[in-house]
Image: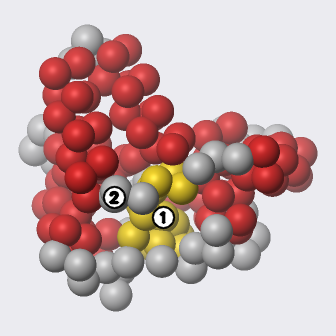
Amino acid sequence: MILVDANVLMYAAGAPHRLKRPSADLLDRIARGEVDAVIDAEILQEILHRYRAINRWQDGRQLYDLARALFPGILPVTAEVLDGARRLLDAHPEASARDAVHAAACRVYDAEAICSWDRDFDRFEGLRRVEPGEVA
């Protein structure tokens, strides 16, 4: 199982960009059941926050609904996940809180990797980051 980061969803749904096609291709593979993938609750919050902040709520609603359809089982962000995120933030002062939450969720739920374009995940020991085109 891999955890899919919000940036993969946003590139797939966004304007033309070099990362759009590989992101959309991965989501197509997930929809066909070829890839065992999940998201955590924080991914949905990121979608809501970002699209509301940039005044593109209609697009955000559509992406949220797509994410809910593609990933019906959402990993909860529990106290155990947040405790893990706090420990990661202690060890990595340069890390963002959101990245730490996703990294901790991967650990708590035994994800084999996080699928993200964000190289900042590479700083977390024991967490493997794959880009959409690398997902087996």
User: Which label is found at residue 39?
Assistant: none
Residue behind mark 1 = 3
Residue 106 seen in the current view: yes
Residue 11 seen in the current view: no
State whether residue 130 is above or below residue 21. Answer: below
Identified at 53% across, 41% down, the residue is: 42
CA–CA distance in space, label 1 to label 2: 10 Å
State whether residue 105 is above or below residue 66. Answer: below
Decide: few, some or many residues near mark 2? Use Cα within 10 Å; few <14, some 14-19, many ≥20: some
State whether residue 68 is above or below residue 49. Answer: below
Decide: few, some or many residues near mark 1? Use Cα within 10 Å; few <14, some 14-19, many ≥20: many
Front of the two marks 1 and 2: 2
The spot of residue 74 in percent (x, y) is 46, 54
Kindly state the secondary structure of the residue where label 2 is placed: loop
The spot of residue 98 in percent (x, y) is 61, 40
The spot of residue 87 in percent (x, y) is 87, 50
Instruction: Identify which amino acid the numbered label 1 is placed on.
Output: Leu
Residue behind mark 2 = 71
Identified at 25% across, 71% down, the residue is: 30
Left or right relative to 111: residue 108: right
Left or right relative to 125: residue 76: left
Quadrant assignment for the C terminus: bottom left
| Outermost bottom residue | 136
Residue 46: image quadrant is top left
The spot of residue 110 in percent (x, y) is 64, 75
Instruction: Identify which amino acid the numbered label 2 is placed on.
Output: Phe
Identified at 79% across, 52% down, the residue is: 80
| Outermost front residue | 73
Q: Do the residues bearing badges 1 and 2 touch, measured as CB atoms within 8 Å?
A: no
